[in-house]
Image: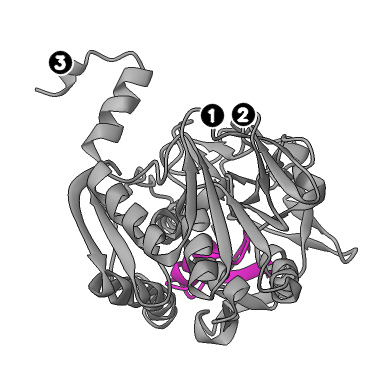
């Protein structure tokens, strides 16, 4: 392609920032990052924002490359035929290539009363709305956290460590990702903090009222403040723009992260569904998918065939208060193993991981493409071959 290529990245989270920074490898690429907020959000710290120990914000100047233009606005529609974006401010923005990295947020709760009486915690705005509610609640208030993934566990622990009376409603299982050994370590720590853990086949929330959470077995738990941490959803921008998505709304792509509808649209992060087999949502995948999406665009600009995506996982880190945590190790295919580290060492390691993630963004800004952080997942390759109907016994020889 002659002249400069104009690449727009929609979404300034972990994947979007990594993608924008990686794109600056080429001097003939103009990079614009469109994001609705003027600051980078450390989603890994939103539970701390609610607990009052961190604001979860980083100046974009600390994590974005100097050659990335930041446009604070919201994209309301993608016009693939005209290669243009409609902005909430009323303007438009053209592109040669688009990286779709809009991330994820709170899933629309289908439980009666949840949308009206429960407070989500998946976004900065959610956490900022929740914090004054928690602060204003009397010390004797009953706080209920619904959802026992990392966000729910961390929020419950953070609030309980601050002296609050907290109930964690898990559904069937506390920390479903965790190995049973890791799960027992989390349960012990929550017990130490005084968190009441409600789990099992009947621990499904069926309704939320102003002062209670109702469960599947008919129980009503007193709840002065209900916090909703049960699942994530993605923005519907792709679907509204006529692009193919999976049932959750993630952009459907091939294994190079290229939209199945348009070769000039590439996806990264929580909003991407490569081959209809999306990775677990979170920054661990995002910081790998972001630069790989950028590499796909750079390859197309250079007239080369992009490489297929590779994402490797090492586990899951969960804070259990400010100084304690658990590091659950996993295989590269994201399956938890028996190995975990718990206690104060894990708490220090979790804090190191959170800080290092921001440093990783800044490193990519200074030295785009200096290092790659992804690994081959053989199990994914097997799943893809099975999806295509290939003979696994022959393919694996």
At mark 3, the secondary structure is helix
Quarter holding residue 295: bottom left
Quadrant of the rendering where the N terminus is positioned: bottom right
Instruction: Please state the extent of the stretch shown in magenta in the rendering.
Output: 6-35
Q: Which residue is mark 3?
A: 393
Residue at position x 73%, y 71% in the image? 137
Q: Is residue 285 above or below residue 240?
A: below
Residue at position x 42%, y 38% in the image? 173
Sequence-earlier tag: 1 or 2: 1
Tell me, yes or no, whether the two marked residues, 1 and 2, touch with CB atoms within 8 Å. yes
Tell whether position 20 is magenta: yes
Tell which of 254 and 360 is nearer to you.
360
Label of residue 259 in the image: none
Sequence-earlier tag: 2 or 3: 2
Label of residue 216 in the image: 2
Residue at position x 35%, y 61% in the image? 189
Mark closer to the observer (2, 3): 2
């Amino acid at each position: 392609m002659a002249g400069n290529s104009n690449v727009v990245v929609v979404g300034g989270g972990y994947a979007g920032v990594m993608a924008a920074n990686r794109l600056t490898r080429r001097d003939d690429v103009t990079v614009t990052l469109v994001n609705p907020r003027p600051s980078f959000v450390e989603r890994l710290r939103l539970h701390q924002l609610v607990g009052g120990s961190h604001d979860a914000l980083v100046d974009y100047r600390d994590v974005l490359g100097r050659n990335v233009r930041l446009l604070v606005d919201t994209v309301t529609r993608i016009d693939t035929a005209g290669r243009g974006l409609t902005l909430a401010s009323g303007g438009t923005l053209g592109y040669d290539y688009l990286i779709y990295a809009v991330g994820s947020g709170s899933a629309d709760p289908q439980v009666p009363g949840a949308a009206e009486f429960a407070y989500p915690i998946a976004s900065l705005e959610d956490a900022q709305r929740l914090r004054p509610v928690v602060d204003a609640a009397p010390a004797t208030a009953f706080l209920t956290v619904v959802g026992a993934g990392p966000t729910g566990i961390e929020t419950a622990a953070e609030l309980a460590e601050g002296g609050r009376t907290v109930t964690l409603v898990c559904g069937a299982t506390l920390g479903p990702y965790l190995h049973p050994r890791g799960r027992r370590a989390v349960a012990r720590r929550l017990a130490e903090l005084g968190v009441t853990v409600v789990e099992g086949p009947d621990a499904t929330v069926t309704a939320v009222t102003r002062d209670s959470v109702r469960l599947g077995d008919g129980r009503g738990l007193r709840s002065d403040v209900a916090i909703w941490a049960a699942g994530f959803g993605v923005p519907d921008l792709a679907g509204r723009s006529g692009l193919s998505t999976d049932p959750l709304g993630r952009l459907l792509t091939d294994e190079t992260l290229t939209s199945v509808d348009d070769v000039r649209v590439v996806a990264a992060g929580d909003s991407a569904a490569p081959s209809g087999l999306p990775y677990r949502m979170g920054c661990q995948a995002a910081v790998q998918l972001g630069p790989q999406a950028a590499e796909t665009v750079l390859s197309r600009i250079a007239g080369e065939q992009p490489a297929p995506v590779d994402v490797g996982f090492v586990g899951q880190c969960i804070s259990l208060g400010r100084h304690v945590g658990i590091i659950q190790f996993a295989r590269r295919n994201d399956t938890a193993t028996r190995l975990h580290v718990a206690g104060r060492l894990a708490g220090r390691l979790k804090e190191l991981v959170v800080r290092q993630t921001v440093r990783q963004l800044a490193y990519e800004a200074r030295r785009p493409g200096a290092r790659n952080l992804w690994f081959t997942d053989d199990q994914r390759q097997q799943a893809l071959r099975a999806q295509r109907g290939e003979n696994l016994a022959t393919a694996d020889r």
